[in-house]
Image (cartoon, rainbow, N blue to C red):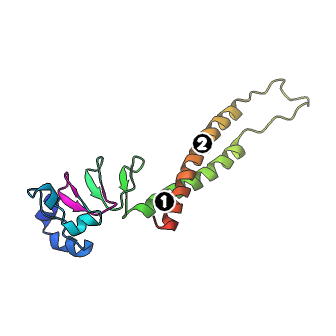
């Protein structure tokens, strides 16, 4: 939701009121605190945002990182440096899904790229074969597996939220 100053400068108050179904500007910042949000809207959970100086609907929240009110605010994602809310929630779920798919591709690829084990015996076999390649594969694989589990749980949770309509 745009700030009060942006709404007034662009002259979009009527357009926003029509799209949202209520007057976003409310009583204004000069009105007493109890009169900023109309009583009918306050009864159903609408609140006044002191920073943006607008009436925000329920489930909207002010993000301190983006410094604006977000409809159906979920969280501020540091990985994409943006808020996850009504307009970009599906893209966030697609992002987490693609990270899960990438992890499911990387882990098996690591084992295929690992150096082969030496065949014991034989005349040309060295006495001691360094196992340096396996330790690197094990460390990278463990980090990828932990990241995959964390992002996988996040992805499953958000898909659950989308399916149940929450």
Which mark is first along the chain, 1 or 2? 1
Q: Neighbour class for label 2 at 10 Å: few (<14), some, many (≥20)?
A: few
Q: Residue furthest right?
A: 122
Q: Position of residue 75 (x, y in %)?
A: 39, 52
Q: Quadrant of residue 136?
A: top right
Give the residues in magenta. 48-61
Q: Residue furthest top?
A: 127
* Residue toward you, 34 or 49: 34
**Quarter of the image where the N terminus is located:** bottom left
* Residue toward you, 120 or 32: 32
Residue at horizontal 65%, vertical 47%? 107
Q: Neighbour class for label 1 at 10 Å: few (<14), some, many (≥20)?
A: some
Residue 108 against residue 125 in the figure, above or below: below
Q: Position of residue 101 (x, y in %)?
A: 59, 56
In the visual, does 120 lie left or right of 46?
A: right
Q: Quadrant of residue 58?
A: bottom left
Question: What mark, if any, has residue 93 been given in the picture?
Answer: 1
Q: How many marks?
A: 2
- Work out whether residue 20 can be spotted: yes
Q: Secondary structure at mark 2?
A: helix
Residue at horizontal 19%, vertical 55%? 52
Residue at horizontal 36%, vertical 57%? 73
In the visual, does 156 lie left or right of 116?
A: left
Q: Position of residue 20 (x, y in %)?
A: 26, 71
Task: Check disc 2 and report the residue beneath it.
Answer: 146
**Quarter of the image where the C terminus is located:** bottom left
Q: CA distance from mark 2 to mark 1?
A: 19 Å
């Amino acid at each position: 939701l745009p700030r009060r100053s942006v709404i007034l400068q662009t002259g979009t108050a009527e357009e926003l009121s029509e799209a949202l179904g209520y007057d976003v500007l409310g009583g204004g910042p000069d009105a007493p605190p109890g009169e900023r949000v109309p009583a009918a809207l306050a009864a159903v959970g609408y609140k006044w945002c002191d920073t943006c100086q607008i009436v925000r609907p329920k489930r909207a929240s002010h993000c301190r990182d983006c410094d604006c009110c977000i409809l159906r605010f979920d969280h501020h994602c540091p990985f994409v440096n943006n808020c996850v809310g009504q307009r970009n929630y599906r893209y966030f779920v697609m992002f987490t899904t693609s990270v899960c798919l990438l992890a499911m591709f990387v882990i098996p690829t690591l084992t295929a790229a690992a150096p082969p084990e030496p065949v014991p015996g034989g005349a040309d076999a060295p006495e001691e074969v360094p196992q340096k390649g396996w330790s690197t594969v094990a460390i990278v694989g463990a980090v990828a597996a932990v990241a995959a589990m964390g992002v996988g749980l996040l992805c499953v949770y958000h898909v659950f939220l989308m399916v149940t309509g929450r």
